[in-house]
Image (tube, grey):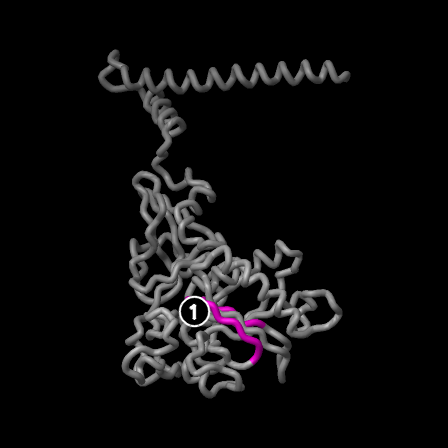
Amino acid sequence: MSRRAERRLEVAFGVILYALAVGWVWSLSHLRTAAASDTAESVPSAAARAAASIATALTSSAAPSAAYLTDAALNAIVEGTRGLSGKLRAVIDTAQKGVEPDTLPPGGELVYSTAGEVTKADSEPKGAGVWNVAVAIGNAIRPITDFSVITTLPFDAKNRGRIGLYYIGNWPAERKKGKVGPTKAPASSYANPSGFIQVTAENADTHVSEHFVLRDFLTHDQPNVWPKYLVLQLKLVDKLELVLEDLAAHGVDISGVRVMSGFRTPQYNATGGNPQGRAALSRHMYGDAADIFIDTNHDGVMDDLDHNGRINVNDSKVIEAAVERVEAAHPELIGGAGIYPAGPGHGPFIHIDTRGYRARWVGGPGGG
């Protein structure tokens, strides 16, 4: 077939499709008008009622069923909770009231369930745990994928340094009167945490963002004690995602990002593992610090990020440069960045936090 014949055929198909679309729209409009103005019978026929119902559903912008909601529409409901990076997948809810949606379809509400039991949903999350979120309209329910509400236990659930069998210890503000921490630090930076995330063996792999799960931030102690308890600020997770995004834009393979140390309970920060180099007021105790490295080849140490053939602190400086660019673009995420050389049992790594003021150091505690 010649190109001219092909063009003629395309034009013919276009005219046919246009005529069908016009006829379909006219038919739907006619059916709705006829159903509304039908005065010949006191009760419309079954065919007229069905036709009017279909026409209304197809032409209404507020179809009364969650089944009409696409994944994009569902995710738009919680778009405001995705952070500056757009990659957060959870909200930490200290009040156990659920999330405030950006928008909802008419007649819709958010409902919460555990372990995927979407049909057994409540209008509010009840108790500490990880909750699936769905949109309910009437009897129809559609889950919002890749999104969780994480409710916490209050701080006073800790009794004599423990919650249940899990030993946590005590924060500096519990032992001291007056302001705790550097004078340049925001007043809230060294206050007691507001609550604890309860992490079980079943929910430990819940995504808090695209690249991180709850398990990544757990203290490295008491391996056989469950549930464990975690303090985590999503502002930190958001910053980590922005740093990874920046590194990827500069040609770094970020698929092997590892968290070497996330949250540390006060007792572990003081005595657990090798406490050398840890600050007494470590940001790790407040849930807004993480020590990370990139290990895409899975050999257990930092990759050669600067491509000079050696693994050393210069590779951590590649990540530090990304931190600098992220903080310049998002001053609300300003914080610490400490570069550490390789040591017994680990390669070089970088500490990143969101303490509220700029801090930089190489080796040593540095307030980390």
Amino acid type at circle 1 is Arg
Q: Is residue 330 visible?
A: yes
Number of numbered discs on residues: 1
311 in the magenta segment: no
Q: Residue furthest top?
A: 40
- Give the image location of residue 54, x and y in percent: 38, 27
Residue drawn at (42%, 80%) of the image: 281
Quarter assignment of residue 248: bottom right
- Give the image location of residue 261, x and y in percent: 52, 75
In the rendered view, tell whether residue 95 sits above or below residue 282. above
Image quarter where the N terminus lies is top right
- Give the image location of residue 185, x and y in percent: 38, 71
Q: Residues within 10 Å of mark 1 (few under 14, many from 20)?
A: many
Local SS, label 1: loop
Residue drawn at (32%, 17%) of the image: 33
Q: Nearer the viewer, residue 263 or 122?
A: 263
Q: Nearer the viewer, residue 357 or 194?
A: 357
353 in the magenta segment: yes
In the rendered view, tell whether residue 86 sits above or below residue 188. above
Quarter assignment of residue 256: bottom right
Name the side, left or right, on which 172 lies relative to 349: left
- Give the image location of residue 77, x and y in percent: 39, 46
Q: Nearer the viewer, residue 255 or 293?
A: 293
In the rendered view, tell whether residue 44 sits above or below residue 248. above
Q: Residue furthest bottom?
A: 271
Q: Which residue is mark 1?
A: 355
What stretch of residues is rendered in magenta? 350-363
